[in-house]
Image (tube, grey):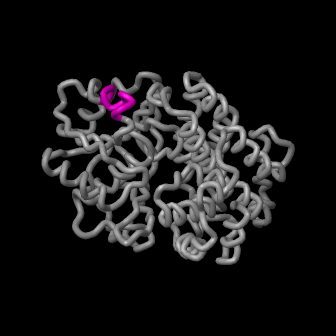
């Protein structure tokens, strides 16, 4: 068992789900609400969590949508109140974990959720009263189990970020066994999310050598195992490395992300049916090429350093290599195959310019730059 104390306490091992009751006791959660979705229940993963909780009285909310909304957080709040719950266990992908974090705010803070959004100046308003969260990821992509933020579509349609150290899960239980049944398409899309996190945070200009080191190692693990995990979901070594890469990407992105996520967050708000990881995969090639001209990228040869761990000759090879990887994974060739329309661009650009990831890209994009990135990704 690897017990890691970095940002939060992480239990990482095949079979780590067995520690769920112990973690509840350590944190002081006596009446947890499990936040999950119908797919996790149908796959039998929810039952594994319930079995691990033994005699702990549990309430379940299993209606998390693919992209959590303020309305779904309110629905979970009604279940929380009916069960008189005192803590949250998120079992699922990033959507379930993000919904749980939204509920951690809403259950303990007054007013509409947007009051606490980062771009609304709401981060300082999220206090230590936020309900405690234990995160049990069932995908290898978002790394939300070790992140201080959540993404929720609020009532006015914006897809907003909420960030506070008070939202950091009190425990993360990373059990690669829970990902063995993940379908190939979801393995690929969530895996590209992890790769995007590692690459974007490494390119971000802030000085944070520990985050850089974690991101590079995570990128190497994901790049060399994502195809194996997608083609053979029972490959235990590949699944372990993908879960580690996902965790590491989020450990590192405390440093900041960039234009890939600005665009993905905004486009995901315009059409909530689009998968975040797939969008990241579509935007990565164009954004890496755009960032190549940034002073910090050139001075520190960051693209070449990424290329080395990816097994490429130079940083200039990265955009084409990402497109080739997307093709190997069976992902779309571009946004057009996802049904994205050019008449959406103005709304996407407006959202990207306001997104919390916009200012941490190594090269600050203008509206025209975002339009060009969108066109190049079609």
User: In the picture, which quadrant includes the C terminus?
Assistant: bottom right
Q: Which residues are magenta?
A: 41-49
For residue 298, what is the image quadrant? bottom right
Determine if the magenta segment contains residue 47.
yes
Q: Residue at x 63, y 28 (%)?
A: 231
Q: Position of residue 271 (x, y in %)?
A: 49, 62
Q: Does 62 sit above or below residue 377?
A: above
Q: Does 237 sit above or below residue 289?
A: above
Q: Farthest residue in the right direction?
A: 313
Principal secondary structure, stretch drawn in magenta:
helix
Query: Could one spot residue 158 in this view of the protein?
Result: yes
User: In the picture, which quadrant includes the N terminus?
Assistant: top left
Q: Is residue 50 left or right of residue 292?
A: left
Q: Does 346 sit above or below residue 312?
A: below
Q: Nearer the viewer, residue 36 or 7?
A: 36
Q: Residue at x 49, y 44 (%)?
A: 143
For residue 93, what is the image quadrant? top left
Q: Nearer the viewer, residue 127 or 270?
A: 270
Q: Residue at x 66, y 76 (%)?
A: 366
Q: Does 242 sit above or below residue 301?
A: above
Q: Is residue 340 left or right of residue 112?
A: right
Q: Is residue 35 left or right of residue 350?
A: left
Q: Position of residue 197 (x, y in %)?
A: 59, 50
Q: Residue at x 70, y 33 (%)?
A: 224
Q: Position of residue 152 (x, y in %)?
A: 40, 60
Determine if the magenta segment contains residue 252.
no
Number of marks in the image?
Answer: 0
Q: Is residue 63 left or right of residue 215?
A: left
Q: Position of residue 14 (x, y in %)?
A: 46, 23
Query: Could one spot residue 128 in this view of the protein?
Result: no
């Amino acid at each position: 068992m690897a017990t890691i104390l970095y940002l939060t306490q992480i239990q990482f091992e095949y079979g780590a789900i067995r520690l769920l009751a112990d973690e509840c006791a350590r944190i002081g959660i006596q009446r947890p609400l499990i936040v999950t979705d119908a797919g996790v229940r149908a796959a039998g993963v929810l039952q594994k969590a319930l079995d691990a909780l033994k005699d702990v009285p549990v309430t379940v909310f299993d209606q998390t949508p693919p992209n959590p909304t303020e309305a779904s957080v309110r629905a979970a709040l009604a279940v929380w109140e009916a069960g008189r719950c005192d803590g949250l266990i998120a079992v699922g992908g990033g959507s379930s974990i993000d919904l749980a974090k939204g509920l951690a705010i809403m259950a303990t803070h007054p007013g509409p959720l947007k009051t606490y959004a980062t771009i609304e100046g709401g981060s300082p308003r999220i206090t230590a009263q936020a309900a405690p969260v234990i995160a049990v990821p069932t995908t290898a992509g978002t790394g939300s189990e070790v992140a201080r933020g959540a993404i929720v579509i609020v009532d006015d349609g914006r897809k907003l970020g909420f960030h506070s150290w008070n939202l950091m899960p009190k425990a993360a239980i990373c059990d690669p066994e829970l990902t063995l049944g993940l379908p190939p398409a979801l393995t690929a899309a969530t895996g590209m999310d992890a790769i995007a996190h590692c690459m974007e945070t490494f390119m971000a200009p802030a000085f944070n050598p520990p985050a850089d080191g974690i991101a590079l190692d995570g990128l190497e693990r994901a790049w060399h195992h994502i195809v194996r995990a997608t083609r053979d979901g029972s490959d235990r070594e590949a699944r372990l490395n993908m879960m580690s890469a996902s965790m590491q990407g989020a450990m590192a992105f405390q440093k900041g992300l960039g234009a890939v996520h600005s665009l993905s967050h905004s486009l995901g708000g315009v059409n909530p049916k689009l998968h975040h990881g797939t969008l990241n995969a579509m935007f990565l090639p164009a954004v890496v090429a755009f960032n190549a001209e940034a002073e910090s990228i050139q001075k520190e040869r960051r693209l070449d350093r990424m290329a080395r761990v990816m097994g490429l000759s130079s940083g200039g090879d990265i955009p084409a290599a990402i497109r080739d990887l997307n093709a190997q994974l069976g992902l779309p060739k571009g946004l057009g195959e996802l049904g994205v329309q050019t008449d959406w661009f103005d709304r996407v650009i407006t959202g990207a310019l306001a997104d919390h990831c916009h200012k941490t890209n190594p090269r600050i994009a203008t509206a025209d730059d975002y339009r060009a990135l969108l066109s190049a990704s079609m």
